[in-house]
Image: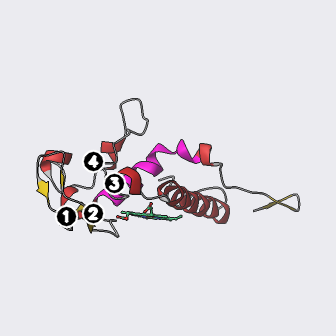
Amino acid sequence: MKENGKEERLIGSAEELNKFVYLHAPFCETSRLYDPPVPINHKMAAKADVLPGGHFVKRNGRILLSFYTMARMEEIWGKDCLEFKPERWISKGECIIHVPSFKFVAFHAGPRNCLGEGSEFHSNEDGCHCYNQELSCTSGGKSSYFDK
Ligand code: HEM
């Protein structure tokens, strides 16, 4: 947008974007239910081990982790696990609820957790933020979609 001949930067800072709870929550819910680009992850044991749940894994034994299935398990997400519900990520105080990465596994968990998780959310939210402002600019200050 140009104001007084100057290019105005409309994108918020990372801190500002983090406050967009109603933008962040749908992204979390989309990543939980529909996104996983890694629907099934697998790991191989470098040596024989016992998993925290008590399962023995022999050396070179392969472990399959179905992130797709985990997003659809009642034991993990409750009875409404199949529903797209961004509100499950929002507290009564209208803050984002922190969900441990071993439960919300779209970005994996532990030492091999996705290093791009933060930037992925940030770029998505940035994109929507710009899109919204673009709409505001092109419709005389009224956003035709997000302000409905
Ligand atoms: C929706 C977007 C994304 C999803 C769902 C995602 C998911 C994942 C998952 C599941 C892994 C673990 C793979 C494994 O088992 O080794 C991973 C690893 C990784 N991701 Fe992402 N990722 C996303 C975007 C990004 C972006 C944008 C970047 C870079 C800016 C990135 C950088 C990495 C890196 C470097 C690793 C390897 C971490 C390691 O092995 O130590 N990811 N990601």
The residue beneath circle 4 is: 103
Distance from Cα at disc 2 to Cα at disc 1: 6 Å
Distance from Cα at disc 4 to Cα at disc 3: 13 Å
User: Are the residues tagged 3 and 2 within 8 Å (C-beta)?
Assistant: no
The residue depicted at 35 percent of the width and 70 percent of the height is 37
Distance from Cα at disc 3 to Cα at disc 2: 34 Å
The residue beneath circle 3 is: 29
**Callout in the foreground (4, 2):** 2
Q: What residue type is labelled 4?
A: Lys
Indicate which disc, 4 or 1, sits on the residue closer to the N terminus: 1
Stretch of the chain drawn in magenta = 17-32
**Callout in the foreground (4, 1):** 1
| Rendering coords of residue 75 (x, y %) | 13, 46
Q: Is mark 4 on a helix, strand or loop?
A: loop
Prevailing SS of the magenta stretch: helix
Question: Residue 18: within the magenta?
Answer: yes
Indicate which disc, 2 or 1, sits on the residue closer to the N terminus: 2
Q: What residue type is labelled 2?
A: Ala
**Callout in the foreground (3, 1):** 1
Question: Residue 20: within the magenta?
Answer: yes
Q: Which residue lies furthest to the left in this view?
A: 55
Which corner quadrant of the image does residue 18 belong to?
top right
The residue beneath circle 1 is: 59
User: Are the residues tagged 2 and 1 within 8 Å (C-beta)?
Assistant: yes
The residue beneath circle 2 is: 46
| Rendering coords of residue 59 (x, y %) | 19, 64
Q: Is mark 3 on a helix, strand or loop?
A: helix
Q: Which mark is residue 119?
A: none
Q: What residue type is labelled 3?
A: Glu
Indicate which disc, 4 or 3, sits on the residue closer to the N terminus: 3
Distance from Cα at disc 3 to Cα at disc 1: 36 Å
